Amino acid sequence: MKQFMKQLLLCVLLATVLGIESMIFAEAAAASAAAASAAAAGSVESQAIRSQSALNELVLQEFRKVVSDYETRVAVAKIAVARGELAPLNGGYWYTTDYFKLLSIAAESGVGQSQMATQRLEFFKRKLVFLMGSAPRKYFNFFDTYEDFRAKRTLTYILKEGVMPAEALEAIKGGALIFIDCGIAIQISYYSALKEMWGQELFNRYFLKKRMVLSFDLHQTPLFQLTDRREIEDASCRDCRPGEWVGFRNHSSYFDKEMNGCAGAFNVIVSESPSGEEDSSKFIGLGLPVRGITTSQMYQELVDGFNAEPFNDRIVLDDVWTERQCYGLQYLIAKYEINRNLTISIEDLLQDGGGLVPRAGARYLNWVLIKSIGNVGSKV
């Protein structure tokens, strides 16, 4: 019950903010070019993917592209923003927190486009972009899940009427500016694998009917119905298979100190099965090295994320942060301040039950179901 109330309070805090517009950005110029080329992209018939392991491998290949692209984008942006250059921040998919840190560096550089960076930073803070996210309005709307117009579901985007799903997908992969998390990054690879397996025509028909959605919560998307899960034996991931989606959870006190961070959990894809040696499974995820990291290295990522300076009030304007106190949430904000300097060790993490979450199982696109849809594609 205590954990439920903590989650409920967090949802209330995110849901009661004022002044959220349906979308903030105009799409990056590169998005339209990418969308135009989507129609010419080749496809592979579903029969070419002849097994579950082959489909898992396709997902892994697509996810490696997403992770590698992000790794490169962040590295380029770090060099650019130190010179006050904003070009790398004008497009692509981003964690809200990474984007905030890089934009702040550009604003504080005092050179180049630092003044423009300062203006963008203030604008994004006021529009609560670093809380709620945003996607290119040409392709997506926020997915409203509450009657109150102010309550938009964070990091959840639904395809706009009249937009082809393949066009929207290629726009995201081609450079349209969108804020995502580690789970949405995997969803992008799922959509990409399905487009490859089914071909563009069936992909468009299916996700027009089912309405393409990107969300921090897989259950909110039509992809969930195309997945299955299996049990994992234990937290060592000894029976994990390449291409499967698994999750790592941080210490339960993470959200006692951090409202806006992205390190509460990591959604990752298994990139290498265990070789028989201890700690030999490897995982890749958005913001993690594309070469893959081991279970123990994942623990360190979680600990480092927990021990980092919290974002909280840094990502909104002072008057917006103060405004929240009008909703009876002063005690919650005070809790964040009390726990601001809280730190943990790997031992603390494991004692708390953090790390790989066996009960969540390993999730994967269901090859049998997807193949059957491909076989009756003309009726979709």
Image: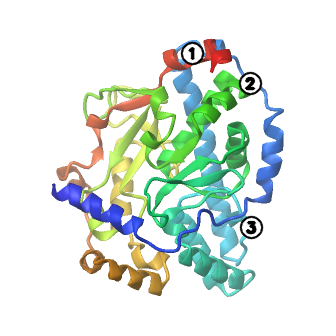
Which residue is at a point 65% across and 14% down the rendered structure image?
Answer: 48
Residue 270, percent from left and from top: 45, 34
Q: Mark 3 points at which residue?
A: 87
Badge 3: residue crowd in 10 Å (few <14, some 14–19, many ≥20): few
Quadrant the C terminus occupies: top right
Eye-nearest disc, 2 or 3: 2
Please report whichever mark, 2 or 3, sits nearer to the chain's N-terminal start: 2
Task: Specify the amino acid type for callout 1.
Answer: Lys
Query: Where is residue 20 shown, x and y percent of the image?
Result: 53, 69
Q: Mark 1 points at which residue?
A: 371
Quadrant, the N terminus: bottom left
Three-letter amino acid code at disc 2? Ser
Q: Indicate which label's residue lies in the foreground, 1 or 3.
A: 1
When the figure is inspected, residue 293 is found, relative to residue 11, above or below; the finding is above
Secondary structure beneath label 1 = helix
Q: Mark 2 points at which residue?
A: 43
Please tell me how crowded label 2 is: few (under 14), some (14-19), or many (20+) other residues with Cα within 10 Å. some
Q: Do the residues labelled 1 and 2 touch (CB within 8 Å)?
A: no
Kind of element beneath mark 3: helix
Disc on res. 309? none
Indicate which disc, 1 or 3, sits on the residue closer to the N terminus.
Answer: 3
Q: Which residue is drawn at 37% across and 79% down?
A: 324
Task: Mark 1: give few (<14), some (14-19) or many (20+) Cα within 10 Å.
Answer: many
Q: Position of residue 355 (x, y in %)?
A: 29, 47
Residue closest to the eye, 313 or 356:
313
